[in-house]
Amino acid sequence: MNLGQIEIAPVYPLWLILLLLLVGSLAGMVQYRLVRRRLGPYQALSISLLRLGGISMIISLALNPSIAVRTEQKVYPPVDILVDTSPTMDLPGHAGKGNRLDEARAFLLGGQNPLINLLAERFDIRIFAFDESFRSLGKEELTALKPGAKRGDLSEVLEKLSRKNSSAVLLSDGNFRWESRHSRSGPLIIVPFGNLESYRDVLIKAVKAPALAFRGREVSIDVAIRSYGYNGLVLPVLLKEGNRLLTAKTVVINSSPAEVAVSFSFTPEEVGQHNLSVSVPPQFGESLASNNAVHLPLSVVRDKIRILMISGSPSLSYRFMRTALKNDPSIDLLSFVILRTPSDIMNVPLQEQSLIPLPVETLFSKELKNFDLLIFDNFPSHLYLSPNYFGNVREFVREGGGFAMVGGPNLLDEGRYAGTPLGELLPVRLTGKEDYRRPPISPGVRLTRAGAFHPITRLSPVETDNLSIWQEMPPLDGINLLEPKSSGIVLLESADWIPRPIVTVGSYGSGRVLVLATDYSWKWSMGMVSKGKGNWAYLRLMERMVRWVTKDPSSDFVQVTLPEKVGEPGKESEVRVKVREGDFSPNLGGTVSFSVFNPEGMEIASRIRAASQPGEYLCSFFPEKEGPYKVKVETPLGDREEVIFIPASGVDLDGAPNLDLLKMVAESTGGKILTQGTDFLKEIETFAGKGQERLLTERRFPLWGTPYILAFILAFLTTEWYLRRRWGLL
Amino acid sequence: MISRRGFLSLLGLGLAANLLFPGPNRSFCASFPQFFFTQLKYRGGEWDPNPQFAEAIIEELELRTSIDILKERRLTTLSDPNLFFCPFLYMGGKYGFEPFTAQEREILRRFLSFGGFLFAEDAMGAKGFGFDQSFRREMKQVFPHHELKRLSADHSVYQSFYLIKNIVGRQTVNPYLEGITIDQWTPVIYSQNDLSGAWARDKFGKWIHECVPGGEAQRSSALRLGINIIVYSLTSDYKKDLIHHPFIKRRQPTL
């Protein structure tokens, strides 16, 4: 220690301290004169100096003296080494020996004096790897480093690197995510890997397609295709549904790299989930084949349910049904009513009639496919339709259309349907020549076992309430005398000695068929109105008939909602299952099952758990690989199957080295791209040295806190006291 | 061969069972075809000014249309529990009638709001008298938020079967029909031209009233209008479907 290390930091103003010292000195001089009169000059001087010394030391404590100890330390500049382990680092590198990550590893560890060791001698280094995760590595872990499954985000990585004034070295091919939101001060020195000149790939770069489409309306799909190293290639682009080719187009690649656009349009004809894909065939020498296809789940719904209704005569049945159908905004109704038969007399010229001819040819040859549902309401079809048209109706239903027949004296056209294509698709048959009866005692109706649970006749979620509603329904004044075929399911029957089917449903081909064997269903509306209960039951019945027969998904017991964004192999995929609200009894909870079958048809492990809402479940599974997975939900009320297409990892991967992005990153961080042949160490030193600093540390030890000072003060004062006492002043 | 004793025993058992276990409620309208006239009886005034009107219009309906019709009229009242199973209600009269009770008005409102149809006509042959005043009063009470308005020339009732240009009856008090329209449906149609007077004929088939001023041509128009009203009650605004529009436009270019 030397005196130069002593520093003061007065706790009071300096002038005050000096004033106190001055006053203390004057007091010492006065004391000296007083003591000298009694003792001698030497003794007085001793006592006065001792007191003056003690007081001065006490006052000088106010100067807050301390000893400052300064040490200087040399600091190694910090350097972070970032190794990009995004999946494209698995692609061939410059020389074609090993992948890009191998080259990055060799860059750091190769040679007799590995760069990593040289860096460690000169810098304070940390090593990190990043892909979808960001992790710190030891030097020895570099040898076992492997590419990850997803590309990383460099912006996030740089935000996590919190060392002040550190530089970073990035080893990457430029296939990471980057947002220039970063404000880090340290420069990024980038060593690029991969060779764009030798890279060859064709990929679906982007697809613009709707997730939801309307049936019968054209859908446009815009595709951007990028290629590297295939100048002059003529490339087919395929739009498929599952394995079925919908349409194909050809594009010509005129440069390398090149990006071309192609548009597809197609009209979905079936409601439901469609698994579309856009693909290009793998090319010779292509680096990546997994990015040649993109899967596009497309949900197709109806914009409106289009109904063609032909009524045999003006009737209350027609008018009440029309009102119910018109009441539903999702229904587009076109109806014809046969106002007069050929035997009726018309006594006025055509100009005074509103009647129009039934456009049979147009409706039954050309336009039928544009409807979702055809209704014959007490329609004597033999008067208007030739057998050929019956065949068209059968084909319409076979291909997925809905067909309903509503009762009345002409329901089965006096048996003329027997043996015709129309008779073939009906779920009922005639019992004899008499096919319609207005009984003297009108029968009520009752639900069958199937009808108690069927969405058409389940008007109330509570089973007992539903039974009561149907028991309350007024009796029918006219019914058709039918028998169900084995393929038909009777939902409602007459409460008669011999029960007759009133509502019967069935399927034919891909379509559904319904027979309502009465022209007095309007009484179900007015009967309930008369009791003050409104007409909701009738409206709901009509709505459910229409939705069921047109296969509207909302009428299904079990609804499966596929994930908007499907997962990938190894990641959990989840679907939401809803057992139709109100139709689900909690007692059935344990019997809802969920199964998943892999692309080979083998069942794989899956999990089902109740969601927050009653009747809703979350079902999940881990797909092992890409491909179509069939999910099946089974409940006592009905089953449902859907297919989820799990795409391969790296579907949208563009593996070309992205030198442009690397340059941009380097510029935005004030760094540099280092090319082959550069003296890397020197370059890194150049950048990292900019941040080099001498670190000066200073420690202060306050003197007033030391016991020696206290001892000195005590020694002065005690000695003075002792001498006073000895010399007789006390 | 069953013995007399056995037969009587079975008959007795059957009667006893019928008394003990009565069958389901029997409908007032059982065995009715799809359309039937139901005439409303009310208190006061004259509820049946043309008792023999139904036969001619029923015959016309049968001859000219495909409607399955009952060849007689039924009578009902607003307190009849079976009123709701008679969705076509005819109400005629000449003179003022007693106000409906609150319950009757509520029943009529419910009947008309949920699918029932009322064709009312003043047979007096003059504006603003007894029946007209009483009927308008009742309609204001039944539908306080809907007015009885003149039906426009393109209303479906004028196009439902014939394309009607002349709105007449036994007389031509108003060259139009009035109605209360709720959404697209007109559950109340009102005429002051005594249509039923033009339709009425005696048991020998002779027209009871002369149609003035147009004579038999006017009667023919009255019958056509009657058919249109009935067809409208069974088809609603079906003629407004787009497919019909070009045909009607060609035949009635003025609309």
Image: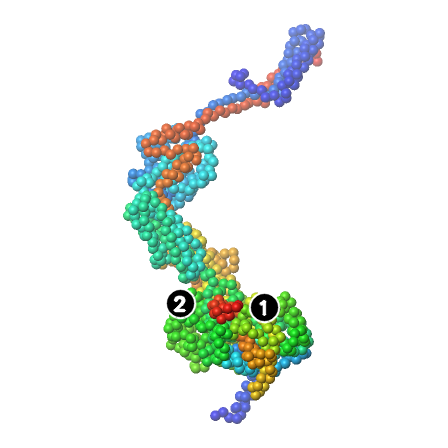
Quarter of the rendering containing residue B127: bottom right
For disc 1, the marked residue is B181
In this orientation, which residue lies closer to the viewer: A189 or A454? Answer: A189
Check disc 2: other Cα within 10 Å, few if <14, some if 14-19, many if 20+: few
Residue A306 visible, this angle: yes
Q: Image check: A703 left or right of A313?
A: right
For disc 2, the marked residue is A366
* Residue occupying image coordinates x 41% and y 40%: A130
Q: Residue furthest left?
A: A284
Q: CA distance from mark 2 to mark 1?
A: 37 Å
Can you say whether A574 is above or below A380 in the image?
Answer: above
In this orientation, which residue lies closer to the viewer: A253 or A78? Answer: A253
Check disc 1: other Cα within 10 Å, few if <14, some if 14-19, many if 20+: some
* Residue occupying image coordinates x 44% and y 56%: A212
Query: Horizontal and vertical percent for residue B110?
Result: 61, 70
Give amino acid for label 2. Lys
Query: Horizontal and vertical percent for residue A267?
Result: 40, 59
Query: What element does badge 2 sit on?
Result: helix
* Residue A333: mark in rendering: none
Can you say whether A720 is above or below A177 in the image?
Answer: above
Query: Horizontal and vertical percent for residue A355?
Result: 48, 73
* Residue occupying image coordinates x 54% and y 73%: B164
Give amino acid for label 1. Thr
